[in-house]
Amino acid sequence: LAATGRVRTLTTSWTWRDRLGAWGVRWGFRRMAYRVQPGLYRIGEPDTNAPVLVTANYKLTLDMLRRELDGHDLWILVLNTHGVNVWCAAGKGTFGTDELIKRIQKHRLEQVVNHRQLILPQLGAPGIAAHEIRQATGFAVVYGPGRAIDIPAFLDNGMKADETMRTVTFALRERLSVIPVELVYAMKFALLPMVAIAIGAVFFGGSHTALILRALLEVLGAILIGTVAVPVLLPVLPFRSFTLNGLLAGLIHVGLLISLVPAPMAWQPVRLLVLPVISAWLALNFTGATTFTSLSGVERELRRSVIPLGISLIAGILAGLGLLLKGWLS
């Protein structure tokens, strides 16, 4: 980003640093630090009649937007969403009415352009009260397409979006793109039980080592079911609820384990009550990556899921420990 007065200039091409940063953030590396300075930017040589696009200050969001704007001259107003993408920030309220009004006034946008229109991303609509924006600033809100790749056609079509542009998808490629960061997130929380299992293998030694290491692999399998299998198989899973889909996939995984892999009696409650919960909870995380579920739907599913999943988790662990203790005492 090269500063030019109060307005920074953006290019439409990615450097190797941009590509490396995009790859890293997909895997969770410095995720919440991957942001740009909020403010007014320009692409090309925009004049007072050039369109004004509004976006979030998550750098990957801005990078994907500018990459599609080659050959266009326009302004980009970047809101301070604390490094969160448009869809999630709209739900959190940071891509919101107050922040947009603040940026318009701070950068004196009425002096930059002659028109009074702002093009906002379609997925930012839940956070914006368009009538309040107009009352406070005089600018009218126009919602652009759901994907950055459609913005050039939207602009060339007189800022009109057809049905295809309005359709928000969650296709396989899009689902695969969010798997890495969820997998890394899950592995961070799995480190403690994995370390406990590894210590158990060292402590017990001998014939127990193989059983304990196999338990570790089964936990890893439950993690992969929730973070990889569920999003990949989402179109064929029967439920609207991500929790139920994760639970179903987790139970299928456990059913195969029980049928094919013998295990001590003390491990069976963990298989039945803990492993499916791990898969279900991790699958639930994908409600924040797709517009299949509204913000209220996400909150409702969390309310309904947390307590039953927690009860199952605790019951499985206690039952396993009880059977293990009973075996030691007998």
Image (cartoon, rainbow, N blue to C red):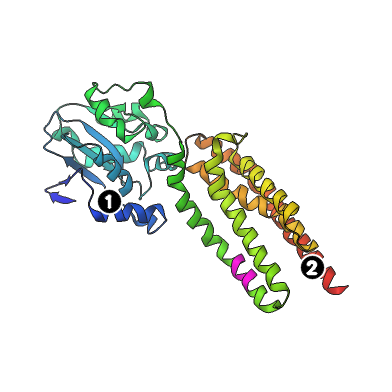
For disc 2, the marked residue is: 324
Residue 138 in view: no
Picture layout, residue 221 above or below residue 62: below
Quadrant position of the C terminus in the picture: bottom right
Q: Nearer the viewer, residue 264 or 277?
A: 264
Name the spot of residue 165 as percent of width and height, x first.
Answer: 35, 26
In the displayed structure, 286 sits above or below 311; it is: above
- Please state which of the two labelled residues, at mark 2 or mark 1, is closer to the viewer: 2
The quadrant in which residue 298 appears is top right
| Secondary structure state at the residue bearing disc 2 | helix
Give the magenta part as a residue range: 193-198
Q: Position of residue 255 (x, y in %)?
A: 72, 49
Label 2 neighbour load within 10 Å: few <14, some 14-19, many 20+: some
Q: Position of residue 225 (x, y in %)?
A: 59, 49
* Label located before the other in sequence (2 or 1): 1
* Residue 145: percent from left, percent from top: 34, 29
Question: Which amino acid, by three-letter code, is at mark 2?
Answer: Leu
- How far apart are the two marked residues, 2 and 1, measured between alpha carbons? 53 Å
Q: Nearer the viewer, residue 180 or 293?
A: 180
Q: Amino acid at mark 1?
A: Val
Q: Secondary structure at mark 1?
A: loop
Residue 194 on the magenta segment = yes
Residue located 26% across and 26% down the image = 153
Q: Which residue is mark 1?
A: 36
Task: Identify the residue at the far front of this view.
Answer: 260
**Horizontal placement of 213 versus 89: left or right?**
right
* Residue depicted at 30% across the width and 39% down the height: 55
Q: Main secondary structure of the magenta part?
A: helix
CB atoms of marks 2 and 1 within 8 Å: no
**Quadrant housing residue 143:** top left
As for residue 215 lying within the magenta part, the answer is no
Please tell me how crowded label 1 is: few (under 14), some (14-19), or many (20+) other residues with Cα within 10 Å.
some
